[in-house]
Image (cartoon, rainbow, N blue to C red):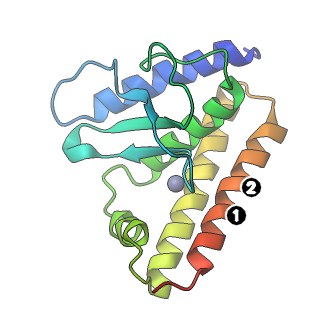
Amino acid sequence: MSDIATLFTALWGQTEQDLARASVRPRLSKGTVAYRFHFVGLEAGSYEWNAGAPRIQLYRSGNLPDDVERPDLVTQPADDACILAYERGHFISDPIGDRSQSAYASFREGIPLALPQKTAIFEEERRAWHNARLVLKRLGWTDWASFEAMQWRLLHGYSEGLAQPRE
Ligand SMILES: [Zn+2]
């Protein structure tokens, strides 16, 4: 399996099923992964435990695809596959968020972080990317240049964001 569209579609389907299976109540897999209109800043998507109904959202700051619950194979499938694999990497690493969510919440609210919280976030980011690499490798991914560019951009964004002095 080498074609990006096929790979992205397989990754999307697997991830939907994994999230549905992890849910605390029986749930359809459809809709556990979706595009969402959102400013693309430090994160290009999100993974949330969502009180036992885990979901991944891929952010779009421009036009949303017509069907937000299906992979968009036209606009930027290679980037989207990397982001989806990375958000799934968070799901794999810290599904309930007990390891890192309080640090992320403080960070998003602009509360000054102590070194252990910064470390918790940065380590979680690194684990998510590590898991993403394994997920994509298993699917036969070959475009590692795109993957690494995306990883560098988002990890760098975090290291800059975490280094900012805050009010
Ligand atoms: Zn992240």
The image shows residue 45, relative to residue 81, as above or below, that is below
Viewer-side residue, 34 vs 87 = 34
Residue 91 is marked as none
Q: How many callouts does the rendering have?
A: 2
Kindly report the distance in space between the C-alpha atoms of the residues bearing marks 2 and 1: 6 Å
Q: Of helix, strand and loop, which one carries label 1?
A: helix
In the picture, measured across the screen, residue 71 lies left or right of residue 26, that is right
Residue topped by disc 2: 152
Kindly check if marks 2 and 1 are in contact, taking CB atoms under 8 A apart as contact: yes
Q: Position of residue 152 (x, y in %)?
A: 74, 55
Residue 156 is marked as 1
The image shows residue 166, relative to residue 4, as above or below, that is below
Name the residue located 55 percent from the left edge and 67 percent from the top edge: 123
Name the residue located 35 percent from the left edge and 32 percent from the top edge: 19
Viewer-side residue, 12 vs 111 = 111
Name the residue located 60 percent from the left edge and 35 percent from the top edge: 135
Q: Position of residue 2 (x, y in %)?
A: 77, 17
Does mark 1's beta carbon lie closer than 8 Å to ligand 1? no
Residue farthest along the right direction in this orientation? 145
What's the amino acid at mark 1?
Answer: His
What's the amino acid at mark 2?
Answer: Trp
* Residue 69 in which image quadrant: top left
Q: Of helix, strand and loop, which one carries label 2?
A: helix
Name the image quarter holding the N terminus.
top right
Name the residue located 43 percent from the left edge and 36 percent from the top edge: 57
Viewer-side residue, 72 vs 39 = 39
How crowded is the residue under tag 2: few (<14 C-alpha within 10 Å), some, or many (20+)? few
